[in-house]
Image (cartoon, helix red, strand yellow):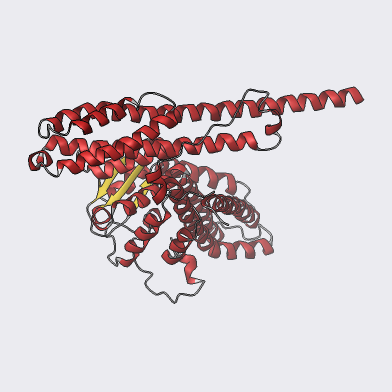
Amino acid sequence: MATAYTYANSNKRKTWFWLIGFVLFVIVVGYIFSRALDMPWILPLAVTIAIIQSGLSYWSSDKIVLSISRAKEIDKTTNQTLFRLVENLSIASGLPMPKIYIIDDSAPNAFATGRDPKHAVICVTTGLLNKLDKQELEGVLAHEFSHIGNYDIRLQTIIVILVGLIALLADWFVYLRFFGGDDDNGNWVFVLIGFALALLSPLVASLIQLAISRKREFLADADGALLTRNPDGLARALEDISKDKEPLEVANKATAHLYITNPLKDQTDSKKSRFSGLFDTHPPIEERVKALRDMAL
Amino acid sequence: MFMWIILGIIVLVAVFVIITYNGLIKLKNRVQEADSDIDVQLKRRYELIPNLIETVKGYAKHEKELFEKVTKERSSLVTGSTAEKVEASNALTDTLKSIFAVAENYPELKANQNFLQLQTDLTDTQDKIMAAQRFYNGNVRDFNTKLQVFPTNLYAKMLGFSEFGFIEAGETEKKNVEVKF
């Protein structure tokens, strides 16, 4: 019999598998590019620039996300019920009290951001507060707490760095091939593989990014249910949110993977093939609800 | 040569025992910290009760028995083991429910802002006690697991460690939260 513990553990294993695969992929691509172009300095240089660039965004990415989502911070007096639910979950999870932000939008949704639990932010829309009951809201908040507790926020940053690096390598490769001059350098087989990778790598990189994001959603669902001891609350909340067809105006493709369900609402076609599912930022709601309902907690 | 192998094994075993010992101490401290977290919330509840009684007394003088019962239960919030205190807090919640029910008969009390605030505060402290209890039980589970796994279970007793008990919720809570492991 599967319990929430086995779900959480298998999700953690799968995430590590993806992460290690991702790192190996970056190393292989970097190596092939440097061989194909016969420029061994490409790999370290690309790594350096990518780290400097993303280092800057690492420290302020939460502020950027909150400001483009037009979120405002609240305190205990503004919304006592919400504040207390968060306070109680902070006690139950043993995590520091996060800051609470609200987006004034009637589409129900929520996300968590920040670089670690001490600098975490939970953000909900007014639509979420109005459309869900207390148990459902607690389920959603517990899901966000799990993202904080599992360091998903930091993981996302790591992935942004890795994906950024691959895109950068691909761009440079194409640029150097055409404008780099000396065509006799490099092995022809490597050049061909390099071209194929230059075309494919940005695609593969974003596929992996999406896959990690989807695994994290299942894991946060499982851990959230463990925190409230009430998988049904989150299951009902997910059903309610998915029934609501209104898109969230302040969300875009870059921030979509942060939210508890896809805020763009562009996946209305239920007869999608397995392949098109690869491009979703979130697993199908039905699968998440089923996983929650199957938990013998 | 044989001596060195024996010596090597002894050193390895010693290192292993030291590592597990330190790990157990860390988890034990976490359990104790979680235990005092429950106390903090119980104390808050303890301090809220006199305010409630004062406020209700102003409107409903004749509910003497209820007041006495609450006062008695209040004192058991700070005496005994944590499990006993949590149990007392659950009993208090039931008595408070009857006070809130009584308040229905006094429209002025029901409209009193102070009373309404106390009502939400008292419900909230009970939620917080239950949250702290969940955190405590989670830490106890981690500690007990570490204690029970092989080979730690062979020498944990000799190092002076013993399992912590879970704090079970009151009967009323058990009905709506079925926990199976």
Left or right: where A267 falls relative to A36 = left
Left or right: where A268 falls relative to B32 = left
Q: Nearer the viewer, residue A241 or A263?
A: A241
Residue B135: x and y, percent? Answer: 44, 37
Residue A96: x and y, percent? Answer: 39, 35
Residue in the image at 36% along x and 68% along y: A266
Residue in the image at 66% along x and 28% along y: B156
Residue A74: x and y, percent? Answer: 24, 41
Q: How many marks?
A: 0
Q: Residue furthest left?
A: B108
Q: In which quarter of the view is residue B9 placed?
A: top right
Q: Residue furthest bottom?
A: A271
Residue in the image at 28% along x and 47% along y: A67
Q: In which quarter of the view is residue A37 placed?
A: bottom right
Q: Nearer the viewer, residue B68 or A202?
A: B68
Q: In which quarter of the view is residue B102 placed?
A: top left
Residue B42: x and y, percent? Answer: 34, 29
Left or right: where B129 falls relative to A152 = left
Question: Looking at the figure, which quarter contains the N terminus of chain A?
Answer: bottom right
Q: Taking the image as drawn, is residue B180 in sight?
A: yes
Q: Residue furthest right?
A: B1
Q: Taking the image as drawn, is residue A76 in sight?
A: no
Q: As displayed, is residue A276 above or below residue A198?
A: below
